[in-house]
Amino acid sequence: MTAKDLARMFEFNAFTLQKNIEAVTDEESLQIPEPSVNSMNWVSGHIVAVRAGLLNMVGGETIWNKEALALYRSGATPLTAENARPVEEIMDAFHASQRAVEQWIAESDARLNEIADGDGFLAEDETWGHRVSFFALHEAYHCGQIGYIRRLVGKEGVI
């Protein structure tokens, strides 16, 4: 895997999220269209929270404080209008994380094929490229979810 390949994955995710969240109000972002379906707000905030974990893993700076991150972790208490982050704040954090992820990838091309430090969550012999690409795949899944949720709350599809 090359840095160019990995960067392309994250670029596509950024494009997909940006298109799917555009013209969505804070109120629309909090709608839960069906039981057991998360809101666009939670899913997009979850992407940012997971990216914060990725950046932490590779030695980057934290994007959000612990309170914001806790709202968007798997299994978190459902969001309310009072505690949810506004869509604009989520997207600002997302764009900041995009720049940080792109920078790490650009500076780590040679490192991507090295065996990653610490406990492997994919395999014992996973490389940094494997580890980071897992995050890109997880994120792509959620970016697609937002496209469907967007339609379920009555917005037109954009991709």
Image: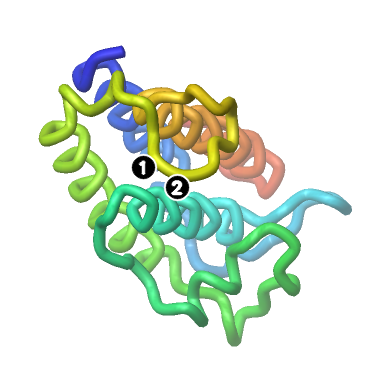
Extreme residue in the bottom direction: 82
Asked whether 133 or 11 is in front, the reply is 133
Residue drawn at (21%, 22%) of the image: 3
Distance from disc 1 to disc 2, alpha carbons, whole Å, reads: 5 Å
Residue drawn at (59%, 29%) of the image: 122
Residue drawn at (74%, 58%) of the image: 32
Query: Residue 102 at x, y = what percent?
Result: 20, 38
- Judge from the rendering whether residue 115 lies leftward or rightward of residue 80; answer left or right: left
Q: Amino acid at mark 1?
A: Gln
- Judge from the rendering whether residue 87 lies leftward or rightward of residue 121; answer left or right: left
Q: In the rendered image, which residue does mark 2 sit on?
A: 21
- Judge from the rendering whether residue 106 lies leftward or rightward of residue 41; answer left or right: left
As displayed, is residue 83 above or below residue 127? Answer: below
Query: Residue 148 at x, y = what percent?
Result: 64, 35
Badge 2 crowding class, 10 Å Cα cut-off, few under 14, some 14 to 19, many 20 or more, is many
Q: Amino acid at mark 2?
A: Ile
Residue drawn at (85%, 51%) of the image: 36
Q: Check the image and tell me how it is coloured.
A: rainbow
* Residue 156 visible, this angle: no
Secondary structure of the residue carrying numbered label 2: helix
Q: What is the number of the mark on residue 126?
A: none
Asked whether 61 or 70 is in front, the reply is 61
Q: In the rendered image, which residue does mark 1 sit on?
A: 18
